[in-house]
Image: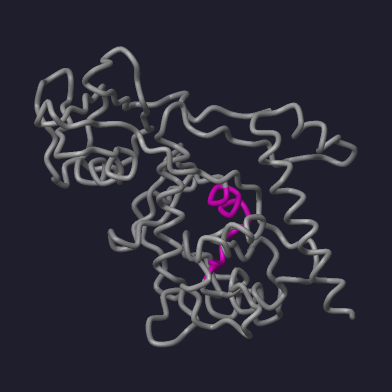
């Protein structure tokens, strides 16, 4: 069963030429200022010239201030009639929960644990780490393991500076990982929140915030700028763009069920849901990739 990101939105925005047809929206949280909203719109909107964003109820144009964004309908229009404005078609990948299914990413998990030692989102320290007990903590991939082929084909490997050999894609580098509490991890993989490295590593929630993480700052323990273990800003920036696309464009990308109790026909559930082909491809890619690497390591 897929959920809808559009339900409960406080803000909707429109192209000036079609004032009755929303092209997107979002749910407001305290971290969303006028400046932040304009910045996120710059990811979504492709324009041939400058444009303005106006709160319909007041007729006042937004300015890049730190004032909280007001709920309501916003109209986007170019300053010049000669210019065009439309919504980007930049792809948003279909993401599944990135969890270990083979021993492939044991090194990834160990290095992320060693570097962080805590949930870098909430700040909760793993007090059992000295006994090597990590119950409730998971190493999350920023760029998902299930999309490794896309990672390689689009040159993301170039951002990883600690690859072990020329054949290592880098997707399992600790530079592509963050330690999180298990419940936080699932929300990260669903793009329910993200981190903006261009705004002081602020955490931005796009959904309801039961964990009270909106507006917090990514813990500096994972941002090792002096060595080659720190998380890469380029990958955080990619995740943030994806979160904007997933949550704010149109009705938003569907959210997927990730809790499959024993006996559930998981593949049947996926096939009957939205984006079935893309999700099936991601699930199979994750599993087959892991099996291949596991067999390769034995040979």
Q: Is residue 102 left or right of residue 44?
A: right
Magenta segment includes 183: yes
Residue ID at (43%, 61%)? 236
Percent of width and height locating residue 58 = 11, 20
Write the residue at 66% across / 79% down: 167
Q: What main secondary structure does the magenta stretch of the protein show?
A: helix
Q: Is residue 165 above or below residue 236?
A: below
Quarter of the figure with residue 17: top left
Q: Quadrant of residue 90?
A: top left
**Which is more toward the observer, 26 or 279?**
279
Residue 287 as seen in the image, left or right of residue 222: right
Q: Residue at x 23, y 25 (%)?
A: 74
> Which residue appears farthest toward the top when viewing the image?
20
Q: Which residues are magenta?
A: 176-189
Residue 235 is left or right of residue 69, and the answer is: right
- Residue lying at 23% horizontally and 36% vertically, measured from the top left: 69
In the rendered image, residue 269, in percent from the top left (x then y), is placed at 78, 31
Give the position of the C terminus as an image quadrant: bottom right
- Image vertical order of residue 29 relative to residue 251, above or below: below
Quarter occupied by residue 166:
bottom right
Q: Position of residue 55 (x, y in %)?
A: 17, 25
């Amino acid at each position: 069963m897929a959920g809808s990101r559009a339900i409960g939105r406080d803000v909707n925005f429109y192209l000036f030429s079609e004032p009755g047809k929303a092209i997107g929206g979002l749910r407001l949280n305290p971290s969303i200022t006028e400046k932040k909203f304009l910045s996120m719109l710059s990811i979504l909107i492709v324009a041939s010239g400058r444009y303005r964003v106006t709160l319909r109820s007041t007729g006042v144009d937004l300015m890049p201030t730190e004032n909280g964004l007001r709920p309501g309908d916003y109209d986007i229009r170019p300053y010049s009639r000669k210019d065009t404005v439309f919504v980007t078609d930049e792809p948003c990948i279909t993401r599944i929960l990135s969890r270990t299914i083979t021993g492939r990413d044991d090194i990834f998990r160990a290095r992320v644990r060693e570097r962080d030692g805590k949930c870098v989102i909430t700040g909760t320290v793993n007090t059992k780490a000295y006994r090597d007990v990590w119950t409730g903590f998971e190493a999350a991939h920023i760029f998902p393991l299930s999309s490794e082929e896309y990672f390689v084909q689009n040159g993301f490997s170039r951002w990883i500076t600690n690859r072990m050999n020329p054949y290592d894609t880098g997707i399992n580098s600790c530079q592509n990982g963050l330690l999180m509490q298990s419940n936080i991890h699932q929300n990260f993989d669903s793009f329910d929140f993200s981190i903006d490295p261009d705004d002081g590593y602020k955490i931005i929630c796009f959904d309801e915030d039961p964990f009270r993480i909106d507006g917090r700052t990514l813990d500096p323990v994972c941002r090792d700028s002096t060595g080659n273990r720190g998380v890469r800003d380029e990958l955080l920036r990619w995740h943030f763009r994806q979160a904007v696309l997933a949550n704010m464009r149109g009705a938003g990308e569907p959210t997927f069920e990730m809790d499959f109790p024993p006996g559930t026909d998981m593949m049947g559930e996926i096939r009957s849901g939205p984006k079935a082909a893309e999700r099936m491809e991601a699930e199979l890619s994750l599993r087959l990739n892991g099996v291949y690497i596991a067999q390769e390591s034995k040979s």
